[in-house]
Image (cartoon, rainbow, N blue to C red):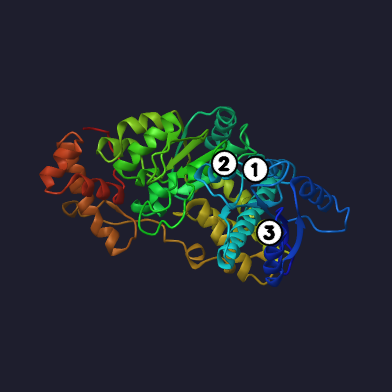
C-alpha cells in the first residue's frame, strides 16, 4: 500500500454494471482501481503488476466475484493465494451460502460479502482486509529479521534451559502433536508457538492466536467456533471462528487455564476429533489444525483443585515446554536488549548504537516481574526518550536506577511469623507474612490436602488456592 494510505485494487466481475459501480466508489475513496472481467484476465494483470511489466505497483487487494465465466472465483482465489500471496482477497457473491463462505475462508479469503453490498460494509471489509494483510506482511518481515539475528524465530537464549527448549521445538515441530507450554506471563510463549508453526510442514498455512482470558466467557465459544446469523442477539451475519480460520495451519490458545469447565469440555472434543459446530448451527465442520496451548498457572494444581478437567489436561499434556522467567536467564539480557534496541532504532529512525556499561549493568540487575515483555517495554521507553546514540542509565526507568536496598539483618520476631533476617519491604508485604505462616502450618497439619485445609480455615478451596499463589506457596499435590 502506498505512503498515502490508499490501495491498488483489482475488481474481478463479469457484470460491467457491478464492476463500474464498485470502481466508482473505490476511486472516490482515493484508491487506484483496475477491472478484470474473468479469472484469466485477472491473473494476467496480477502477474504484470508483480513483475512491473506495466510500470504499476502490485495489487494490495482483489475483490472477486464467485460466479465468473470459465474458472470460478474460488479457483481464482486458490491461484492468487498460491502465486500472489501479497494480495489480499475479498469474495463477492449474489448467492451467499454458508458452504461457499466456509470454503472461501478455508482458501484464505480475508472476507466474504453478499451482493448488493452497501458502501459502509464494503469500506469496512476493505479496511479490515488491508489491515490484516499489512500485519501479516510486517510480522513476516520481522520474523525474517529476527531469524537472521537469533536462529530460532527471534527467540534469543544461551541459557541451558532455553537451549533444551530450542532442541525440543525442532524435534516436535514436524509432527501434529499437541504442545502445552507453561510459564509466567511475558516469557515468550507466543514466540515459541510461532517457532513451532514456522518449522512445521504447515508454515505456509495460517497461524491463529487467541488469548482465552481476554475474551468474555459468553463470547469465547463464538470466537473459537464461529456462529450463524441469528444464533444470538447481535449475530447479524455468519462468522467464522478461529478454528476454521486456522484450518490447515496452527492455532495457539494462550491462557487456557482461564477457560470455564463447559468450554474445556468443548475444547476436549475439538482437540480429539478435530470437528465442531458453530454456535446456532447443527452443521459439523471438520478441520485439520495443529493445537498449541499455554497456561500461566500450573495446570496440575488446578486439576488437583477441581478447577481444570483432568481428561483435558492429560489430552493436551503430550509434549510439555516449561519456559523459565527472565530473572533466571540473566546472561540472555544483553542480547535481548540489543535486539530490541535495533528494532526500535529502525522504527524511530534513530541511530542508536547500544548501552553504556552502567545501563547494561542496571538492566542485568533488575528482577523483571513482567519478564521479556517488560524488558522490551523498558528498551522501547529508553529509545524514545534518549537524546544520545547510546542508552545511558538515566534513560532507564527509576526502578532500574534505584534498585531496592540489599538485605539487612535485624532481630526477628518469631511470634509474628517474621524471619530472623529482614529484607526491607512494603507494609502490605510484611502483613502478608503472618498469613503465609498460618497457611503453611495448616497445610502441613492436613498433609497438604487443600479441601481439608480450606474447611478448617472456613474458606473455599478457590480462595485458598488464590492465597497460595499470592503468597508464593507451592507444595505437594494432594486431593
Can you give x and y, in whole percent of width and height, for residue 11 in the image? Answer: 71, 57
| Residue holding disc 1 | 74
Could you say where residue 420 lies in the image, as x and y percent from the top left?
26, 51
Q: Dividing the image into 4 quarters, which one contains the C terminus?
A: top left
Residue 316 visible (yes or no): yes
Query: In the image, is residue 256 above or below residue 4?
Result: above
Q: Earlier in the sequence, mark 3 or mark 2?
A: 2
* Distance in Å between CA atoms under marks 3 and 2: 50 Å
Q: Pointer 3 and pointer 1: residues touching (CB < 8 Å)?
A: no
Quadrant (top left, top right, bottom left, bottom right) of the N terminus: bottom right
Q: Nearer the viewer, residue 472 or 268?
A: 268
Residue that mark 2 sits on: 103
Q: Look at the picture and state if 102 lies above or below 479.
A: below
Asked whether the beta carbons under mark 1 and mark 2 sit within 8 Å of each other, the answer is: yes
Q: Which residue is mark 3?
A: 354
Dividing the picture into quadrants, the one containing residue 441 is top left
Label 1 SS: helix
Amino acid at each position: 500500500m502506498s505512503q498515502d494510505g490508499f490501495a491498488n485494487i483489482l475488481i474481478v466481475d463479469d457484470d460491467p454494471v457491478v464492476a463500474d459501480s464498485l470502481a466508482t466508489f473505490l476511486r472516490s475513496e482515493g484508491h487506484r482501481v483496475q477491472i478484470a472481467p474473468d479469472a484469466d484476465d485477472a491473473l494476467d494483470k496480477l502477474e504484470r503488476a508483480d513483475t512491473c511489466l506495466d510500470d504499476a505497483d502490485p495489487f494490495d487487494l482483489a475483490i472477486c466475484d464467485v460466479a465468473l465465466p470459465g474458472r470460478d472465483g474460488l479457483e481464482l482465489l486458490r491461484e492468487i493465494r498460491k502465486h500472489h500471496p501479497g494480495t489480499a482477497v475479498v469474495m463477492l457473491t449474489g448467492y451467499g451460502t454458508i458452504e461457499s463462505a466456509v470454503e472461501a475462508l478455508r482458501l484464505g479469503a480475508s472476507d466474504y460479502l453478499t451482493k448488493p453490498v452497501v458502501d459502509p460494509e464494503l469500506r469496512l471489509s476493505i479496511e479490515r482486509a488491508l489491515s490484516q494483510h499489512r500485519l501479516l506482511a510486517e510480522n513476516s518481515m520481522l520474523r525474517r529479521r529476527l531469524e537472521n539475528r537469533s536462529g530460532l524465530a527471534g527467540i534469543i537464549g544461551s541459557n541451558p534451559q532455553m537451549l533444551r527448549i530450542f532442541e525440543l521445538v525442532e524435534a516436535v515441530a514436524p509432527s501434529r502433536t499437541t504442545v502445552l507450554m507453561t510459564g509466567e506471563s511475558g516469557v515468550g510463549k507466543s514466540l515459541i508457538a510461532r517457532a513451532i508453526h514456522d518449522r512445521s510442514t504447515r508454515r505456509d498455512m495460517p497461524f491463529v492466536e487467541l488469548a482465552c482470558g481476554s475474551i468474555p466467557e459468553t463470547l469465547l465459544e463464538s470466537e473459537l467456533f464461529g456462529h450463524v446469523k441469528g444464533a444470538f442477539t447481535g449475530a447479524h451475519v455468519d462468522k467464522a471462528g478461529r478454528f476454521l480460520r486456522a484450518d490447515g495451519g496452527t492455532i495457539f490458545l494462550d491462557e487456557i487455564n482461564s477457560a470455564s469447565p463447559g468450554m474445556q469440555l468443548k475444547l476436549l472434543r475439538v482437540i480429539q476429533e478435530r470437528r465442531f459446530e458453530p454456535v446456532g448451527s447443527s452443521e459439523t465442520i471438520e478441520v485439520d489444525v495443529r493445537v498449541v496451548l499455554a497456561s500461566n498457572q500450573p495446570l496440575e494444581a488446578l486439576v488437583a483443585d477441581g478447577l481444570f478437567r483432568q481428561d483435558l489436561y492429560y489430552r493436551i499434556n503430550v509434549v510439555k515446554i516449561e519456559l523459565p522467567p527472565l530473572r533466571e536467564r540473566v546472561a540472555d539480557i544483553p542480547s535481548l536488549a540489543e535486539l530490541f534496541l535495533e528494532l526500535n532504532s529502525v522504527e524511530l529512525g534513530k541511530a542508536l548504537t547500544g548501552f553504556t556499561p552502567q545501563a547494561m549493568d542496571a538492566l542485568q540487575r533488575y528482577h523483571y516481574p513482567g519478564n521479556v515483555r517488560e524488558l522490551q517495554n523498558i528498551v522501547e521507553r529508553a529509545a524514545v526518550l534518549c537524546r544520545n546514540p547510546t542508552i545511558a542509565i538515566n534513560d532507564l526507568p527509576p526502578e532500574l536506577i534505584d534498585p531496592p536496598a540489599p538485605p539487612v539483618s535485624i532481630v526477628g520476631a518469631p511470634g509474628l511469623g517474621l524471619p530472623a533476617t529482614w529484607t526491607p519491604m512494603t507494609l502490605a508485604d510484611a502483613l502478608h507474612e503472618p498469613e503465609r505462616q498460618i497457611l503453611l502450618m495448616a497445610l502441613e497439619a492436613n498433609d497438604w490436602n487443600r479441601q481439608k485445609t480450606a474447611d478448617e480455615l472456613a474458606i473455599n478451596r478457590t480462595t485458598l488456592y488464590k492465597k497460595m499463589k499470592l503468597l508464593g506457596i507451592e507444595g505437594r499435590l494432594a486431593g
